[in-house]
Image (spheres, grey):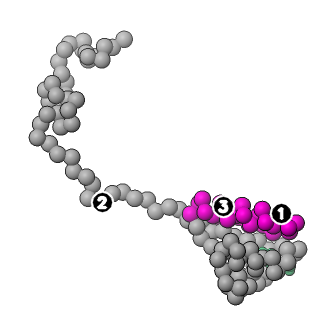
Amino acid sequence: MVDEMSDERGDDMDDDGFGTYGDIPGGGRNTAVVARAKPKTKKPSLYRVLVLNDDYTPMEFVVYVLERFFNKTREGATRIMLHVHQSGVGVCGIYSYEVAETKVAQVLDLARRNQHPLQCTMEKE
Ligand code: TYC
């Protein structure tokens, strides 16, 4: 058991070299704390939300999903839907992890409740 007030050598020397005021910021010396000039920030990773083609989901339902959850115009939504229909997959939008996750869940929930097999997923950009 090491007493808080003593050190490993068991003597009573204050080892920080700054006298007996080690608990005071700056150790009692005339010091100042300078903030970083540029705070370190991290851009959030982005995720693509993808919709997949299938043989059964009605085109109109996919267009509706793109309008409702991805804020597409009727024209934009139709273009994406047709691209997915022809190529197999398409990007609905690009979001932070949490937003992408929510949108995927909303699409899958609406599709399930309407008994459509529409699949939606996300991938890191
Ligand atoms: N292939 C579907 C059909 O012919 C339409 C469709 C388009 C389905 C896009 C899903 O993500 C999709 N009814």
Image region (quadrant) for ligand 1: bottom right
Q: Is mark 2 within 8 Å of ligand 1?
A: no
Could you tell me how far apart the alpha carbons at marks 2 and 1 are, in whole angstroms?
Answer: 48 Å
Q: Earlier in the sequence, mark 2 or mark 1?
A: 2
Q: Earlier in the sequence, mark 1 or mark 3?
A: 3
What quarter of the picture does the C terminus occupy?
bottom right
Residue 66, by quadrant, is: bottom right
Q: Which residue is mark 1?
A: 112
Q: Secondary structure at mark 3?
A: helix
- Rendered location of residue 84, percent (x, y): 75, 79
Q: Which residue is mark 2?
A: 38
Q: Could you say which is closer to the camera, residue 12 or residue 75? A: 75
- Can you say whether 17 is above or below 60 in the image? above
- Can you say whether 14 is above or below 46 in the image? above
Residue drawn at x 63%, y 73% as measured from the top left: 93
Q: Which residues are magenta?
A: 96-125
* Residue 17 visible in the current orientation: no
Residue drawn at x 18%, y 37% as measured from the top left: 26
